[in-house]
């Protein structure tokens, strides 16, 4: 007999009106031509074009002049190649030039799914029995490019869920490249990314054991300038692209959580940031930090990465290293066990694995934890977010893929002191697509990246058919009792 699960009457749909102003570059030669044409306009013509443009787009973007100015600065080299002194240009002409290198991108135009949920750091001004949560989503726009977006929600004492409406503006973070790199780990990741080994050896011989972005960039540009072959130059570019995967981002303090979007930044994630699994992690000293594992995708290769934040304004981003960080589905346990970090993964694409590590970003020696057992998961089994600590053990929501590649959600229970020991697993799916949920961008799929316990109920946000998202809940004690049988 299947466990009774309540479907919540709440659905969160993609909103095509939510757009960001992205930098657009059409090649150096064409860009120089555009600069020359703009420079031929009179001051009156420039003002006549830019003035109504600013009025129109200021209603769609926070501080559009700042965005256009930033985009103009990005083509400074093209401006100078056109024979123009960038510093001598007046503000209006810089804004107009910036507009020719800007386009709007609707981050949610295609889909809004695969949610993860954590307790909001701010629990002020709530009544007893309420909880404020932050939900992350995978938002998909034109070209199937994925980004991470957020919503704030409130769960009341009766388990009713209210998702707070999104703001009118979307804000991209400021990117800060001030990371200090470990030479050994950096070069190993570069080799794993199939960058030419001869170029890596040449660059590695010039790097110190610890180096920063400025040092790396100078070595790369110097080495690239000595090359004549375009394919060889590309290998140098790839190293610099890899360095972009280590960075910090910071959002303006006047943004709402729904205004903040983590959009692909580095070349190694140009095709999307997929399926962030957020977890509220308790450090050894009792303090709280939020981590999220996600998959960066460049169109052919995936790279597991780690986000960390304490406030959801400032994020540190770095790639994950090691044999166990080679595929999707990494999910961090919410605390250390026996002094070590613990991670679930699915390195072979079919089975769940368990890993321990002394370092948060290095994962080796994966050990198989679960393999498909029941018909509804014969194709593959994976986690649906970080394990949840309960009195009965570690509760893991899983996903299974069965006939017709239908995705269902299941549940497993593991020993609290030894998570390599499986206590129990549901024979039947916990949640499966119903007739109202099977149609969408990818039919017959239910998927989640994290759940939460509130007032004795397990609340699972889930994406349905890779189109929109909804919620389900189940009595925690009933689920645990079934898993222990």
Image (tube, helix red, strand yellow):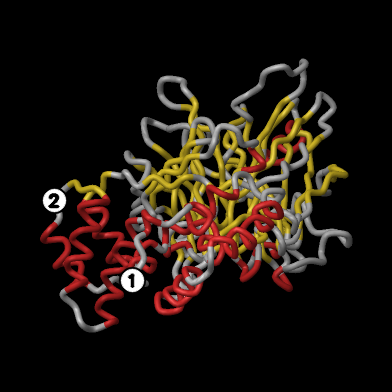
Q: Position of residue 315 (x, y in %)?
A: 47, 40
SS class, disc 1:
helix
Circle number at residue 272: none
Q: Residue at x 56, y 59 (%)?
A: 22
SS class, disc 2:
loop
Asked whether, in this view, residue 225 is left or right of residue 266, the answer is: left
Q: Residue at x 75, y 61 (%)?
A: 467
Q: Callout 2: 10 Å neighbours few (<14), some, many (20+)? A: some
Circle number at residue 81: 1
Q: Please tell me which residue lies in front, 183 or 402.
A: 183
Q: Please tell me which residue lies in front, 222 or 119.
A: 222
Q: CA distance from mark 1 to mark 2?
A: 34 Å
> In this orientation, does residue 330 appear?
yes
User: Which of the two discs, 1 and 2, labels the residue nearer the N terminus?
Assistant: 1
Q: Is residue 174 above or below residue 83?
A: above
Q: Position of residue 431 (x, y in %)?
A: 77, 51
Q: On the image, which quarter does residue 206 sit in?
A: bottom left
Q: Please tell me which residue lies in front, 418 or 31.
A: 31
Circle 2 is placed at which residue position?
208
Q: Are marks 1 and 2 in contact (CB under 8 Å)?
A: no
């Amino acid at each position: 007999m299947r466990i009774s699960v309540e479907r919540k009457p709440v659905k969160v749909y993609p909103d095509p009106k939510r757009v960001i102003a992205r930098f657009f570059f059409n090649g150096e030669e064409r860009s120089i031509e555009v600069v020359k044409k703009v420079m031929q306009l009179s001051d009156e013509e420039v003002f006549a074009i830019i003035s109504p443009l600013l009025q129109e787009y200021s209603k769609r973007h926070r501080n559009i002049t700042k965005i256009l100015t930033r985009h103009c600065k990005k083509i400074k080299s093209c401006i100078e190649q056109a024979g123009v002194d960038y510093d001598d240009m007046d503000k209006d002409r810089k804004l107009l030039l910036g507009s020719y290198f800007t386009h709007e991108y609707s981050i949610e135009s295609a889909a809004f799914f695969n949610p993860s949920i954590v307790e909001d750091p701010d629990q002020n001004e709530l009544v007893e029995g309420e909880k404020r949560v932050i939900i992350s989503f995978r938002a998909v726009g034109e070209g199937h490019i994925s980004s991470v977006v957020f919503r704030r929600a409130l769960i009341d004492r009766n388990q009713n869920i209210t998702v707070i409406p999104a703001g009118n503006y979307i804000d991209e973070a400021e990117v800060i490249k001030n990371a200090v790199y470990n030479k050994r780990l950096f070069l190993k990741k570069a080799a794993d990314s199939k960058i030419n080994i001869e170029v890596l050896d040449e660059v590695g011989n010039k790097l110190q054991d610890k180096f920063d972005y400025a040092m790396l960039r100078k070595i790369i540009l110097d080495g690239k300038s000595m090359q004549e072959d375009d394919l060889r130059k590309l290998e140098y570019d790839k190293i610099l692209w890899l360095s972009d995967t280590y960075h910090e981002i910071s959002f303006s303090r006047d943004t709402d959580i729904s205004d903040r979007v983590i959009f692909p930044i580095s070349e190694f994630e140009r095709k999307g940031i997929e399926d962030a699994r957020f977890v509220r992690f308790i450090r050894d000293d009792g303090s709280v930090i939020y981590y999220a594992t996600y998959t960066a995708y460049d169109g052919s290769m995936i790279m597991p990465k780690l986000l960390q934040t304490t406030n959801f304004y400032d994020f540190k981003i770095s790639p994950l290293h090691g044999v166990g960080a080679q595929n999707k589905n990494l999910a961090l346990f919410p605390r250390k066990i026996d002094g070590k970090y613990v991670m679930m993964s699915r390195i072979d694409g079919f089975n769940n694995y368990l890993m321990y590590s002394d370092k948060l970003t290095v994962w080796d020696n994966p050990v198989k934890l679960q393999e498909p057992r029941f018909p509804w998961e014969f194709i593959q089994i994976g986690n649906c977010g970080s394990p949840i600590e309960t009195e009965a053990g570690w509760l893991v929501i899983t996903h299974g893929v069965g006939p017709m590649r239908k995705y269902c959600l299941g549940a497993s229970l593991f020993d609290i002191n030894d998570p390599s020991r499986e206590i129990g697993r549901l024979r039947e799916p916990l949640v499966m697509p119903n007739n109202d949920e099977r149609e969408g961008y990818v039919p017959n799929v239910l998927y989640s990246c994290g759940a939460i316990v509130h007032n004795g109920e397990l609340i699972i946000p889930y994406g349905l058919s890779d189109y929109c998202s909804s919620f389900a809940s189940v009595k925690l004690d009933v689920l645990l009792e079934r898993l222990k049988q």
